Image (cartoon, helix red, strand yellow):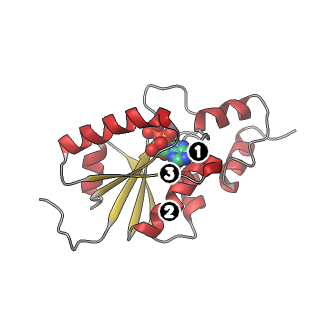
Amino acid sequence: MPFAETSPRVALYPGSFDILTNGHLDIIQRGRKLFDRLVVAVAANSAKREPTFSLEERVQVLHEVVAPWPNVQPVQLEGLTVEAARAHGARFILRGLRAVSDFEFELQLAIMNHQLAPDVESIFLAPAPEWIFLSSSTVREVWRLGGDVSQFVPPPVLAALHRKRPLV
Ligand code: ADP
């Protein structure tokens, strides 16, 4: 059944969040002010690569990061994004847009999701300029090579990275 225009404004922000960066956090911070409720849905990694954090670890750390904001709800993403959106009562899908490189992929996803569920709207937010080139994969690479990533990730993520590989 389509969403009523008067229903609460709930958005689903899907991603793998492996590693959760300040860019993701920036989108969460903006989204939580725009929507009544923001469901942050953590996907098991696509075929991309060996994950840094397990799905459970990513959801756990997200809980710590968003603890101050009661309208932000971390969940595991199962199945199709549009179906997860419906299951959580979300009529918006929120995505972050960085540089031009994100654009084509995000547009493809948004069009596909629109064809699957025309009443679920995709919404895009740009992060603050300092995060526009920040990605999980570059943070992961710097961390893997022993670099300091403290300026790129929220403190609970840094703590989780240190637990995974204690600083000597
Ligand atoms: P996916 O697994 O879908 O690629 P990611 O976890 O990498 O997901 O990112 C989830 C969402 O967050 C995507 O919409 C992505 O564009 C956005 N995002 C990632 N990094 C940033 C950033 N630095 N600034 C703004 N949005 C970002």
CB atoms of marks 1 and 3 within 8 Å: yes
Q: Nearer the viewer, mark 2 or mark 1?
A: 1
Q: Secondary structure at mark 2?
A: helix
Q: Secondary structure at mark 1?
A: loop
Left or right: where 82 falls relative to 95: left
Residue 16 picture location, percent across and down: 48, 41
For label 3, being within 8 Å of ligand 1 is answered: yes
Residue 95 picture location, percent across and down: 42, 48
- Between 96 and 163, the one lying in front of the other is 96
Residue annotated with mark 3: 126
- Between 92 and 131, the one lying in front of the other is 131
Left or right: where 66 falls relative to 107: right
Q: Residue at x 19, y 47 (%)?
A: 117
Residue annotated with mark 2: 30
Q: Is residue 46 above or below residue 42?
A: above
Residue 29 picture location, percent across and down: 53, 62
Find the distance from the CA under tag 2 to the CA under tag 1.
15 Å
Q: Is residue 100 above or below residue 92?
A: above
For label 1, being within 8 Å of ligand 1 is answered: yes
